[in-house]
């Protein structure tokens, strides 16, 4: 029995990227009446898919459509081991390999689509790890900044091991009142099994972060949800996070009120996405790119 494709917001289309021979599926939404100011590359977390950034429970949840309305191209990529690459990579890829594959996919995207002033990475949860490693080890000249939510550098003492996400569980999402009622019916279409190689890398992140953070040389913004349960975001942990990212020319740490781990699926999604795009506008301004 074939599963019907998940619904998409108006203006969003499915594309495929060639990551040095690895096909990655993606969702793309472009400005309707102008060239893009820049391109936002959205990278989903473990057990999710690119559809995470095109939430269907409410019309205003979609990062793809909001970004396009504000002049950005938004590209949401299915990471290696998800979407079209599942058949070729049934075990997925380890974290460092994922960063290299994402960088290759972005080279293909640049060759085929207008990107405006450059690229921003907007990543969630495990995708934040991939994005940070991409910025550290595969930073192209047109990478202008990174936004990460649902990911820190030190796990909370009672953080889940990740097995819950692999089973499609939602205990780590935060209070259910933070999400529209339709989230848990429309959300099923964006859930996916966590590939084994990715699962194995989850517990290694604090060590990987310590080794990579000092190589990140673009502006970075971290957002922690009010009800974030996976990560430590107390003053001591945030001070250490800042000290590790010593080469980043700008580091912002924000908190999103009224949100759980999956911010882009909750009622706070629009507020969060606008804050992210505001950060990207600041980065463009530093590059001399103005709105008018």
Image (spheres, rainbow, N blue to C red):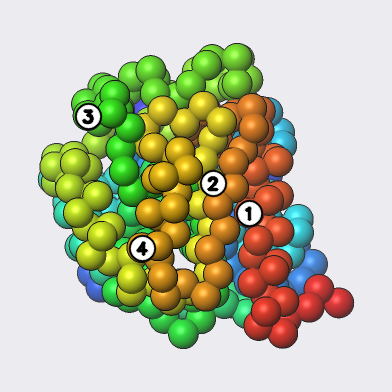
Whether residue 21 is situated above or below residue 150 in the rendered picture: below
Whether residue 207 is situated above or below residue 200 in the rendered picture: below
Asked if the residue at tag 1 contacts the one at tag 2, i.e. Cβ–Cβ closer than 8 Å, the answer is yes
Q: Which residue is mark 2?
A: 223
Q: Position of residue 154 (x, y in %)?
A: 31, 43
**Position of 89 compared to 190: left or right?**
left
- Does label 2 or label 1 sit earlier along the sequence? 2
Question: For residue 276, which numbered disc appears in the image?
Answer: 1
Question: For residue 161, which numbered disc appears in the image?
Answer: 3
Determine the secondary structure under disc 1.
helix
Furthest-front residue in this view: 236
- Does label 3 or label 4 sit earlier along the sequence? 3
Q: Residues within 10 Å of mark 1 (few under 14, many from 20)?
A: many
How many labels sit on residues?
A: 4
Comparing labels 4 and 2, the label whose residue is closer to the camera: 4
Q: Which residue is mark 4?
A: 244
- Does label 4 or label 2 sit earlier along the sequence? 2
Q: Position of residue 153 (x, y in %)?
A: 33, 48
Mark 3–mark 4 distance (CA, rounded to whole Å): 24 Å
Furthest-right residue in this view: 292
Determine the secondary structure under disc 3.
loop
Mark 4–mark 1 distance (CA, rounded to whole Å): 22 Å
Comparing labels 3 and 4, the label whose residue is closer to the camera: 4
- Does label 3 or label 2 sit earlier along the sequence? 3
Q: Position of residue 115 (x, y in %)?
A: 58, 75
Asked if residue 189 shows in the view, the reply is no
């Amino acid at each position: 029995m074939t599963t019907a494709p998940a619904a998409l917001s108006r203006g969003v289309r499915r594309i495929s990227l060639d990551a040095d021979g690895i096909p990655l599926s993606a969702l793309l939404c472009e400005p309707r009446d102008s060239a893009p100011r820049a391109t936002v590359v959205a990278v989903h977390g473990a057990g999710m898919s690119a559809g995470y950034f095109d939430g269907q429970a409410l019309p205003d949840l979609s990062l793809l459509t909001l970004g396009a309305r504000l002049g950005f191209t938004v590209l949401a990529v299915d990471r290696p081991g998800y979407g079209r690459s599942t058949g070729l990579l049934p075990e997925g890829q380890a974290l460092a390999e994922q960063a290299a594959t994402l960088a290759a996919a972005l080279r293909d995207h640049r060759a085929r689509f207008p990107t405006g002033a450059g690229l921003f990475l907007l990543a969630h949860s495990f995708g934040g790890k991939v994005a940070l490693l991409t910025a550290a080890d595969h930073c192209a000249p047109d990478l202008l900044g990174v936004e990460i939510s649902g990911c820190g550098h030190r796990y909370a003492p009672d953080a889940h091991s990740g097995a819950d996400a692999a089973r499609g569980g939602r205990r780590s999402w935060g209070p259910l009142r933070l999400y529209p009622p339709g989230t848990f019916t429309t959300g099923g279409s964006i859930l996916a099994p966590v590939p084994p190689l990715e699962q194995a890398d989850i517990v290694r992140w604090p060590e990987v972060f310590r080794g990579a953070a000092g190589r990140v040389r673009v502006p970075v913004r971290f957002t922690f949800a009010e009800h974030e349960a996976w990560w430590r975001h107390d003053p001591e942990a945030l001070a250490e996070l800042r000290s590790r990212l010593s080469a980043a020319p700008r580091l912002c740490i924000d908190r999103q009120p009224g949100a759980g781990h999956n911010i882009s699926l909750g009622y706070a999604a629009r507020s969060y996405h606008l804050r992210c795009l505001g950060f990207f506008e600041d980065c463009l301004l530093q590059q001399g790119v103005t709105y008018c």
